[in-house]
Amino acid sequence: MKQRKDKIDFSSVLAAAVHDMKNSLSLMIQSIEELESTLREHGVGIKEAASIHYQAARLNTGLIQLLSLYRTQLDNLPLNIDEHYLDDFIDDVVAYNQNHINTRGIDLTIEQEEDLHWYFDQDLVNVLISDVIVNAIRYGKHKLIISAREVNNMLELIIEDDGPGYPDKMLDITKAEISQLDISTGRTGLGLFFARLIAEAHVSDDKKGAIELANGGRLGGGVFALRLP
């Protein structure tokens, strides 16, 4: 009689491993932030530490994206919709990226309607916006504008930079399916696909969220817009 061997669900094992790596990386990022503060007091190694922080943050975002994509395959992208004031939300996002902003000498402008509040998943949208900000800081030069407003019963979060703008290929990615992404290149567009996934998961009545990329804007660089119903 042959002994039955249970099949290993590799995707579940991989998801569990990614979850553990994400937790470890989060602790590492906290340590890097503490190191940055110490180095800033002594005025040495600030740029090097900021570069390490940036790469660690990118890895952490990538792991979160992988987990979310896995859960989407299970039709289980976890959403925790609640009411949030945009001034508090933007303050939290900026605080998380403040060291990187300071190190690059970015002139940040925040524009938001007074008492603006909306219903959305704070954690997922935080990851989305933080990833956009980090890339805007990396490719921008000196200025960054974050704005929040209500337009046609939709929340608009817009990030503008003074960099070279988005390549044409990235402008097209926002409409691509994941099977169409070119994983053989360094910039696959997975981050933008993930952003679209989060946006479209926010649904109200007959409306759903969306993202839009453009070039130009007030600073002449890249313009990222997130719209939520």
Image (cartoon, grey):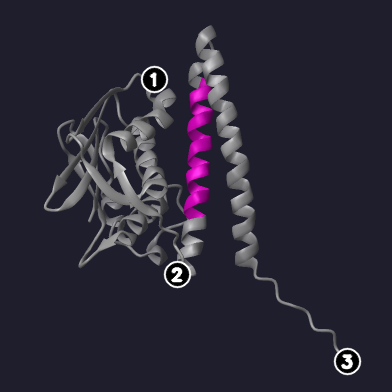
Determine if the magenta segment contains residue 61: yes
Of residues 139 and 81, the one drawn nearer to the viewer in this rendering: 81
Left or right? Give the position of 196 relative to 127: left
Task: Between label 1 and label 2, give the one nearer the viewer.
Answer: 2
Pointer 3 local density, CA inside 10 Å: few below 14, some 14–19, many at least 20: few
Instruction: Quote the CA–CA distance across marks 3 and 2.
Output: 39 Å
Q: Amino acid at mark 3?
A: Met
Instruction: Quote the CA–CA distance across marks 1 and 3.
Output: 68 Å
Which contiguous range is marked in magenta? 48-66
Give the label on residue 102, or none.
Answer: 1
Pointer 2 local density, CA inside 10 Å: few below 14, some 14–19, many at least 20: few
Give the label on residue 75, or none.
Answer: 2
Left or right? Give the position of 17 relative to 129: right
Choose the circle earlier in sequence order: 3 or 2: 3
Q: Quadrant of residue 146?
A: top left
For the C terminus, the image quarter is bottom left
Q: Amino acid at mark 2?
A: Asp
Q: Are marks 3 and 2 in contact (CB under 8 Å)?
A: no
Residue furthest left in the image: 152
Q: Are marks 1 and 3 in contact (CB under 8 Å)?
A: no
Q: Residue at x 63, y 49 (%)?
A: 20
Residue furthest bottom in the image: 1
Up-down relation of residue 207 to residue 48 (above or below):
below
Q: Main secondary structure of the magenta part?
A: helix
Q: Residue at x 31, y 44 (%)?
A: 84
Instruction: Quote the CA–CA distance across marks 1 and 2.
Output: 40 Å
SS at badge 3 = loop
Q: Position of residue 191 (x, y in %)?
A: 40, 50
Q: Position of residue 180 (x, y in %)?
A: 38, 64
Q: Position of residue 160 (x, y in %)?
A: 23, 35
Give the label on residue 1, or none.
Answer: 3
Q: Residue at x 35, y 41 (%)?
A: 132
